[in-house]
Amino acid sequence: MLDIKFIRAEPALVQAGAAKKRIAVDVDAILALDKQVRELGVVIDDMRSRQKSASKRIGEAPAAERPRLAEEQKREKAALQEQEREHSALQARLRELLLRVPNVPAAEVPEGRDDSENVEVKRWGTPRSFDFEPRDHIALGELHDWIDVERGARIAGSRNYFLKGDLSLLEGAVLRFALDRMVAKGFLPMSVPTLVRSDVMVGTGYFPGGVEQAYRCDERDDLCLVGTAEVPVTAYHQDEILDGQSLPRKYVAWSSCYRREAGTYGKDTRGLYRVHQFQKVEQVIVDVADPARSLAHHHDIVRNAEEVLEAFELPYRVVNVCGGDLGAPQVQKFDIETWMPSRRAYGETHSASRFHEYQARRLNLRYRDPEGVVRVCHTLNNTVAASARMLIALLENHQEADGSVRLPAALRPYMGGRERIGAR
């Protein structure tokens, strides 16, 4: 959420930022409502002051005057209560509108309508040229009885699956390597809830605007399944004031993730690319409100993910996400896309975002600076490894003509020292 004081001071900048993100917002209407709320607040303060004075006057008035004055006070109290109800309703409406105001994108965010206009900033590795007809990951999985999509759909519906045997072990190996790598870099590992309250989804910027993508348990509990460990980890210090000297806080969490993939019917339906449940290792940083430090963290968390892909010997590219593909909460986002032979293209495997105060203001996540001033934190996050899509890239890029899959050296200690899986 943006500070209303910032919106008052920079309405044109906020409106232009929303336009760059292709998000409809009427800043003038928000400011008009904000003015109404503030003006009514002054009226209410004045009415409360008069109420206090009236009580004193009644006590000092002659006995004959007290019934009339008491009746006047009763009417004024009823009027005050009505104004307070109106004020509360206006405040709620203003908050609802403020929750839909997107963060202002950085100047470095390119113009563009959608992901086709994201700008490549880096490329590493060369896509492999096969001297045989390569299989896609589903064909490889079925060849070795590693993947069972049919039973997954029968038990849990479309876009669900079972991983079996060596592929199940490989999933664990990928995620454990990613976790170990981050712990070695000083990130604190966490096991986190994957069911959270709706206010936590609001706090991290997923609601409103992303409700259709979440699995909600509304009938009996106000709980939602998370689509990423970013949600519980970022909210871990909700409503707290941290010691500024303890920042940055760096966390890494391995969790199951759930996404409805609403609006993607008929898109990427084959295989593991777009599924409802997967596992992911996520990195989150909470730090002081310093844009330069946030930018440095942003480059660091992108590099953390790059190092994992390089260790897995997977070609990738990094793109600067354009305005039209940038979510409401982000100041800037870099996507990492990994080469997937069956797609004949790079597929998104990581998203690294910085938010400045946007999430922390919603979560009331603050710190006390050296001068004792309480300020709102900055937050960032990025994937380290996401199981389903990483498995696609590993199987397809490292397959051999006989259907076996070569394991990168980095993963062999996690796979019992084996150099290949699926060898016949």
Image (cartoon, rainbow, N blue to C red):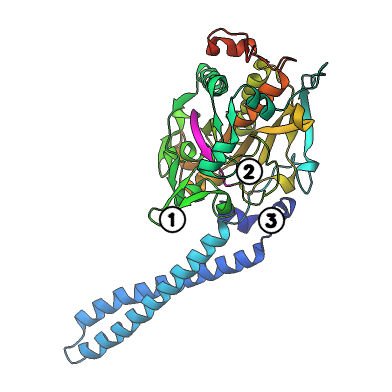
**Which circle marks residue 330 in the picture?**
2
- 336 up-or-down from 232: above or below: above
Residue pointed to by mark 3: 23
- Rounded to the nearest angstrom, the CA distance separating label 1 from label 2 is 27 Å
297 inside magenta stretch: no
Q: Secondary structure at mark 1?
A: loop
Q: Residue at x 40, y 78 (%)?
A: 82
Q: Are marks 1 and 2 in contact (CB under 8 Å)?
A: no
Q: Looking at the rendering, in which quadrant would you find the C terminus?
A: top right
Dominant secondary structure (helix, strand or loop) of the stretch shown in magenta = strand
- Residue 230 or residue 365, whichever sits in front: 230
- Residue 215 or residue 252, whichever sits in front: 215
Local crowd size for mark 3, using a 10 Å CA cut-off: few (<14), some (14–19), many (≥20): some
**Which circle marks residue 218 in the picture?**
1
Which numbered disc, 1 or 3, marks the residue that appears first in the sequence?
3
Which segment is the magenta one? 251-260
Q: State which mark lies toward you, 1 or 2.
A: 1
Q: Are marks 1 and 3 in contact (CB under 8 Å)?
A: no
Q: Residue at x 67, y 24 (%)?
A: 140
**Residue type (three-letter) at the residue carrying disc 2:** Gln
Q: Is residue 229 visible?
A: no
Q: Secondary structure at mark 3?
A: loop
**Residue type (three-letter) at the residue carrying disc 3:** Ile
Local crowd size for mark 1, using a 10 Å CA cut-off: few (<14), some (14–19), many (≥20): few
- Rounded to the nearest angstrom, the CA distance separating label 1 from label 3 is 27 Å
Residue 215 at what x, y percent from top left? 51, 49
